[in-house]
Image (spheres, rainbow, N blue to C red):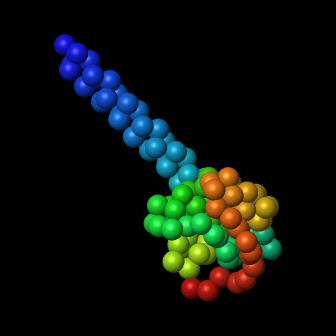
Amino acid sequence: MKKYVLFLLLASVAFSCQYSTQQKEDKAKAETISASEVAGENLKFTTLDVKGMTCTGCENTVKKSVTELGGIIEVTASHKDGKATVEFDASKTSIEDIQKAIKNKGYDVTNYKFSKKTE
């Protein structure tokens, strides 16, 4: 009986964690927008120097933290280069918000620069 109760408890925890993660992913996907939806003067592209990323898990953490902000179009991160690139709608979020989201996950943003997006 104890094994059965333990199994049910573990199964419910595993399911609830997976369900919660899926809800967050769905919310993040719903909030991202396309560049064509943004007025030209509000469309910004920036590259940030991010210290502390050591693996692809770190890259995913940085991408997820930024994607959760409103107005994010695209985010990439590279632990090998120590950089993150963000395309965003400046009328909905700011570079300060992006930096804060990354810093809140334990990484340091040491510099950033705005540029034009290169395909």
Q: Residue shown at 73%/57% (left/top)?
A: 100
Residue lying at the far bottom of the rendered structure: 118
Rendered location of residue 90, percent (x, y): 77, 65
Is 56 left, or right, of 89 in this rendering?
Answer: left
Q: Which of 103 and 98 is in front in this view?
A: 103
Residue beneath the point at 47% across and 61% down: 57
| Residue that protrudes farthest toward the top in the picture | 1
Q: Where is residue 82 in the image (x, y as percent from the top left)?
A: 59, 75
Residue 7 percent coordinates (x, y): 25, 25
**23 w.r.t. 45: above or below:** above
Q: Where is residue 114 in the image (x, y as percent from the top left)?
A: 75, 79
- Name above or below for residue 114 compared with residue 61: below
Task: Give left or right: position of 25 versus 35.
Answer: left
Specify the quadrant of the image occupied by residue 85: bottom right
Vertical position of residue 81 compared to residue 76: above or below: below
Residue 24 in view: yes
Task: Please tell me how many numbered marks the rendered image carries.
Answer: 0
From the viewer's side, name the closer residue of 17 and 91.
17
Residue plotted at (74% across, 75% down): 112
Res 67 seen here? no
Res 86 quadrant in image: bottom right
Image quarter in which the N terminus is found? top left
The residue at the point 34 percent across, 27 percent down is: 12
Quarter of the image where the C terminus is located: bottom right
Considering depth in this image, is 94 or 90 the residue closer to the camera? 94
